Amino acid sequence: MLRASLRGAAAAALLAGCVADTNENDVADTISAPRNVELGTLTCRLAATENLLVYARESFACTFEGDDRTTSYAGRVTKVGANLQLKNNQTLRWLVLAPARYDAPGMLAGSYLGASGEASVGVGAGARLLVGGSDDAITLQPLSVSTTTDAVGLSLTLDSLKLDYVGPA
C-alpha cells in the first residue's frame, strides 16, 4: 500500500510538472530525451460505478486499437481523494505510449497509477495521467479529455487502473 501511495504521489508530481513553465535549459533537456513510441489508442466505457465520496470503484469495458490489432480489456479504476461526483455515462480515451514498440497480445494488462481531475454539470470533462503496465513502461496519456454525460460533481483523486486482458475484439 505504501509503494502504491508513493507511486501515486510521484505520478501526481509528474502531472503537476507537465503544467509548469519551461525555460531554455528545460527545452534543451527535452530535445535530448528519448521519445516514446505511440502504440495506439485505449478507449474505455463505464460499465458500473460505486462512489463512497473519498473512495470510488469504477468498472470499464476497454478496447485497444493499435497498428494491426484490436484487443479487449476489462478495466477497474480505484480512486482515493475528493470524489463528489455522480455519473451514469463516461468514456475515457488515452494515447498509449512506451519507450519501445511492444507487440504482444495482452501487452497493456497490468496496474497503472496516477492522478485525475474531473468536473461536470450534465456534461463534464476531465484529464488523467497513468503510468504502469508491462514492466512499468507504458504511459496512458490523455488523448483528449474524458467525457461524461448525465453527471454532476467534482473530483480530484489519485487513481489506480487495473487492466485484465480479455482477448481479440
Image: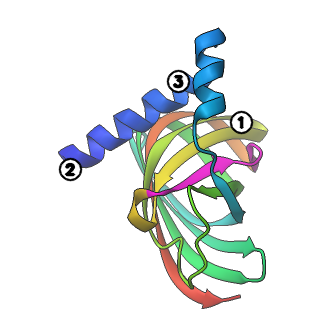
Tag 2–tag 1 contact (CB < 8 Å):
no
Query: What secondary structure characterizes most of the magenta part?
Result: strand
In the displayed structure, would residue 89 be above or below residue 1?
A: below
First of labels 1, 3 by sequence position: 3
Question: Badge 3: few (under 14), some or many (20 or more) residues near its Cα, within 10 Å?
Answer: few
Label 1: which residue? 120
Would residue 73 appear left or right of 149 to someone viewing this image?
A: left
Label 3: which residue? 16
Q: Nearer the viewer, mark 2 or mark 3?
A: 3
Question: Badge 1: few (under 14), some or many (20 or more) residues near its Cα, within 10 Å?
Answer: many
Would residue 38 appear left or right of 129 to someone viewing this image?
A: right
Name which quarter of the figure residue 53 lies in. Answer: top left
- For the residue pair 34 and 56, the one nearer the viewer reads as 34
- For the residue pair 131 and 24, the one nearer the viewer reads as 24
- Whether 5 is among the magenta residues is no
Label 2: which residue? 1
Question: Badge 2: few (under 14), some or many (20 or more) residues near its Cα, within 10 Å?
Answer: few
